[in-house]
Every structure is written in C-alpha cells, then in structure tokens.
Image (cartoon, rainbow, N blue to C red):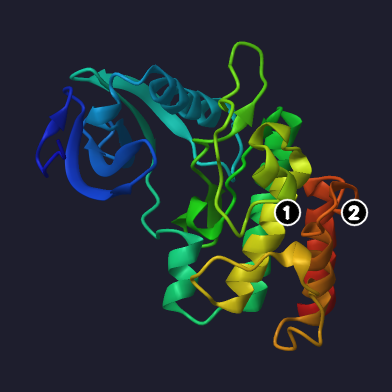
C-alpha cells in the first residue's frame, strides 16, 4: 500500500510525498523529526515481503551505500522496519538526477564532463573497496546541491566485502541495456571494474547527445569526429576507449579514465 503525506514511519519520519518507484521499493521524501532535515526513504514493496532473495538484495543495497563513505556516493543514514517492511534512509537530492537536469536544459558539454569526473571518482573508490556498481547511468546520478553529483542505486551491485554476500543469482539479468558492457550482458556474474567504465563511457555519450533514450551499442560503432561532429573532439577518444567491446582495450581503472577526462577538460576549456 502506498503511503500518503502525513503518514508516519515510526516516531521519526513523516511522509511528505512520493519521489519514485525503484526496482525493489517506493522512494519517499520524508521529514526527520529528530534532525528536522528532509531525507529520502526507500521502503520495500509489500508484495516482496515473502521473497527472501529480494529482501536480501534490498538490505544489501543499504549496507553497501552505508559502508561506501565518499563525497560522491549517496549516503545512507539508517536502516529500519515498518510493519514488516524494511526501509533505509538516504540523503535527499532536491535537484533530481543528471538525466533530469540535462533533459530540462541543452547539455552544457563542459558540465557533462565534470559530472562524469565526480562519478568516476566515486567508482574508483567503490572499486578499491571491492564493489562494482553494474548500473551506472544518468538516472542513477543524483544532484544533492548545485555542482555536487552522487552515485546512487546500488541495488544490483556486486560487493565482495567480508560478511556481505554477492547480490547476483544465476540467470539474473541486471543492469540497463545501452549502458551494459558485452560481458555483463552475457553473464552479470563476470563483471569487472571495466564493466562500470563501459557504462561511464555510455553515460558520457548519452548526456552529451542530449537524448533521453539509452545510447546505442557503442562497442559496435565508430565513435569519432566524422560520426559525431557536434561532440567536443577531445572527448570522443575517451568515449571510444571506455566502450570498447574488449575489456583489455578499455581503461585499466576508473582513475585512469578520470585523469584522461580531466586532461580533456583542461585542453578544451581552459
């Protein structure tokens, strides 16, 4: 049952409005009556209460986000239960997503590149902590303050930290087409950090293009000045390398892609 404005979750959180519907739960804007701050609260769907694997995935998402303490990862503040439905409380992003921002306004190509610098910084940290996101895309990049972008939605992440089980089951199809590297499409259990790098290249392409629809299979086309004359030339080799079909031909790490992108920004706009 969807909650209404004014409903309470425990004694602490008051529902203000619904923000959206995730793969596993509703997301609400709430007021924390202890701190008086507005937060986002994700509540497991009622029809998933009896599904142990989905409940486990929901809880794992919360724990991953709580453990990854980085300025560009959306933080989780608390985890609880409401009428047998588990929930977790996150930072509220009043400015929406990168997808929302660049749908509203023509893409500012320098800003797009700088957004992806922040995402790559978050991914470099996550990869160092044995976490592969597996669903990097503009809709999962939240804006908490002007100029501050945070990676969110770790619901299908692969996390190998001690004490936290991997999230994938055999046969799962996890991620978003257009942002998924070929190896992830073939078997989501075989993802590597370079699978997230592919998604970053696809997200960079998508935001620069100004298209709401997912990008094409970039590993199968030529990403060059002849095909994309309206893109900044210095960014095209970065997209091309990040989205190669072969893992070995992509950047070795998110940090390496971030540094290449920073250099492209410097050479193009400074």
Residue at the (37%, 46%) spot, across then down: 92
Residue sitting nearer the eye, 269 or 67: 67
Residue at the (17%, 36%) spot, across then down: 14
Residue at the (78%, 45%) spot, across then down: 194
**Quarter of the picture holding the N terminus:** top left
Answer with mark 1 or mark 2, whichever residue precedes in sequence: 1
Neighbourhood count class around disc 1 (C-alpha, 10 Å): few under 14, some 14–19, many 20 upward: many
Residue 36 falls in which quadrant of the image? top left
Q: Where is residue 171? Give x, y as percent.
A: 57, 32
Q: Where is residue 66? Give x, y as percent.
A: 51, 27
Tag 1 near tag 2, CB within 8 Å? no
Locate residue 247 relative to residue 230 in the image: left or right. right
Residue 230 falls in which quadrant of the image? bottom right
Tell me if residue 117 can be seen.
Answer: no
Q: Where is residue 202? Give x, y as percent.
A: 67, 62
Q: Is residue 252 above or below residue 227?
A: above
Residue named by callout 1: 198
Q: Secondary structure at mark 1?
A: helix
**Quarter of the picture holding the C terminus:** bottom right
The circle on residue 249 is 2
The circle on residue 148 is none
Q: Secondary structure at mark 2?
A: helix
């Amino acid at each position: 049952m969807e909650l209404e404005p004014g409903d309470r979750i425990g004694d602490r959180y008051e529902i203000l409005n619904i923000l959206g519907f995730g793969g596993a739960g509703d997301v609400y804007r709430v007021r924390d009556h202890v701190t008086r701050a507005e937060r986002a609260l994700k509540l497991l769907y009622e029809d998933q209460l009896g599904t142990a694997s989905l409940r486990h995935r929901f809880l794992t998402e919360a724990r991953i986000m709580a453990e990854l303490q980085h300025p560009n990862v959306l933080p989780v503040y608390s985890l609880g239960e409401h009428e047998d439905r588990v929930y977790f409380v996150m930072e509220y992003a009043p400015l929406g997503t990168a997808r929302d921002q660049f749908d509203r306004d023509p893409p500012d190509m320098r800003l797009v590149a700088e957004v992806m610098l922040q995402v790559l910084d978050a991914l470099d940290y996550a990869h160092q902590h044995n976490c592969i996101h597996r669903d990097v895309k503009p809709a999962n990049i939240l804006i908490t303050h002007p100029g501050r972008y945070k990676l969110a939605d770790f619901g299908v992440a692969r996390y190998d930290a001690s004490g936290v089980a991997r999230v994938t089951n055999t046969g799962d199809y996890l991620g978003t087409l257009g942002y998924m590297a070929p190896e992830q499409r073939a078997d989501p259990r075989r993802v590597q950090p370079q699978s997230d790098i592919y998604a970053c290249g696809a997200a960079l392409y998508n935001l620069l293009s100004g298209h709401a629809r997912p990008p094409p299979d970039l590993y199968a086309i030529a990403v060059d000045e002849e095909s994309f004359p309206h893109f900044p030339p210095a960014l095209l080799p970065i997209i091309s390398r990040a989205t190669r079909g072969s893992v070995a031909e992509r950047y070795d790490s998110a940090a390496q892609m971030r540094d290449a992108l920073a250099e492209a920004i410097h050479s193009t706009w400074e």
